[in-house]
Amino acid sequence: MDNITIEELKILKRVMETNNITQTATELYINQSTISKMIKRVENQNNIQIFNRKRGFSLTNEGEIFYSYIMDLLKTWKSLEHHISEQNTNYISKIHIGLPPIIGSFLFPKIITSFIDTYPFIENIIYESGGLKIEEDLLKGDIDVGFAVLPTKNSSLKSHIIYQDVFVICVSEKHVLAKYDEIDFVDLKNERFICFSNDFMIHQYFLKMCEISAFEPNIILNSSQWDLIIELVGVNFGISIIPRILISKFEGKNIKEIKISKPKLPWEIGIIYSDANYLSIAAKNFIEIAKKTYYPLI
C-alpha cells in the first residue's frame, strides 16, 4: 500500500464500516470527492476492487480481506503511538473506559475516586453503553478497559472479578409477600414483574431463575431506568428482582427486601480488557486500582 497515510487508512476503514461515502464525509468533515479519489487510487495501486458499486456500494470479497488487514495495521499503529507517548514524561495519559449504567451509578464512583487520588494527571474518558457493546469496542480496540457482568460473551477477553452480590426480591411494604424475609423463587410464579430491559444482563439472570424454577413470568413492564422501577415497586404496581446493592437507593421508598432461598445465582462484576490490544501503563494501573477497591460480599 504505497503512498497511503494512517489518516487515509482510518477514513477508508470508516467507509468500509458505513458502506456510504456521503455519511463518512459528513462524519469526518471531508469532501466526498476527496474520499472517492483516495479509494480509487488505493484500488488502482493494489490492483483490487474494494467496493462493489453495482450492489449498493458494498464490500467485495477482496474488500473484506482488505478491511481485516487495515484493522490489524491500525491496532499496531495505535500500540506504537501509546508506547512512544509513554516514553515522553510530559505526556498526559488517557484511558478510554466502557461503563454500563448500573455499574456506573453504584460501583464506579468509588473506583474512579481512588484512581484519581493516586494518579491525578491521567485523563479518563468514559463511554456509557451496554455490556455487549463494551465487549465489541474492546475487540475493535476503541476502548482500553471496560466493566461488565461476568462471564463475558466473548471468551477471548480477559477479566477480573471486582465485586460480587446476590439477587433479592423487591416488593412494596403493602404487598402480601412483605411479611416474609426469605422465600423460594418458584413461589413468585403468579406475581407481576417489573424488569430491567432485555439488553441488561440483570434481565438475563431473571429469565434464568424463571427457567430453573419452571415457570413463565408475567412481565408487565421493562425499563432501563432503575429509579422508575423502584418507584413502581413502591406503589405496589409489581415486584422486581434486583442485585442487593440497589437496595441502598430504596430508603424512604416503602420497599421491602426479601432473600431468595433458591435458586442462588451470584451477580459478578468484572473489569475486562483484551490481550490483543496494547495496554498502557495507565490502563494497567487502573485495572489494579479497580481490583483492590471492592472485595467479594458473598
Image (cartoon, rainbow, N blue to C red):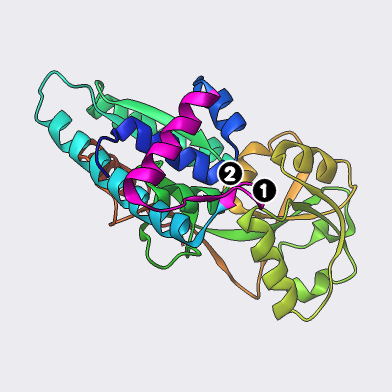
Between 152 and 28, the one lying in front of the other is 28
Dot 1 falls on a residue whose secondary structure is loop
Between 188 and 118, the one lying in front of the other is 118
- The residue that label 2 is drawn on is 19
| Quarter of the figure with residue 180 | bottom right
| Mark 1 touches mark 2? (CB < 8 Å) | yes
**Picture coordinates of residue 220, whole percent (x, y):** 89, 54
| Horizontal side of residue 3 vs 230, given as left or right | left
From the viewer's perspective, is residue 94 above or below residue 151?
A: above
Between 220 and 251, the one lying in front of the other is 220
**Picture coordinates of residue 234, whole percent (x, y):** 82, 42
From the viewer's perspective, is residue 190 above or below residue 49?
A: below
Q: Which residues are magenta?
A: 32-58
Residue 127 visible to the viewer = yes
- The residue that label 1 is drawn on is 56
Dot 1 or dot 2: first in sequence order is: 2
Between 233 and 91, the one lying in front of the other is 91
Given the image, on which type of amino acid does mark 1 rest? Gly
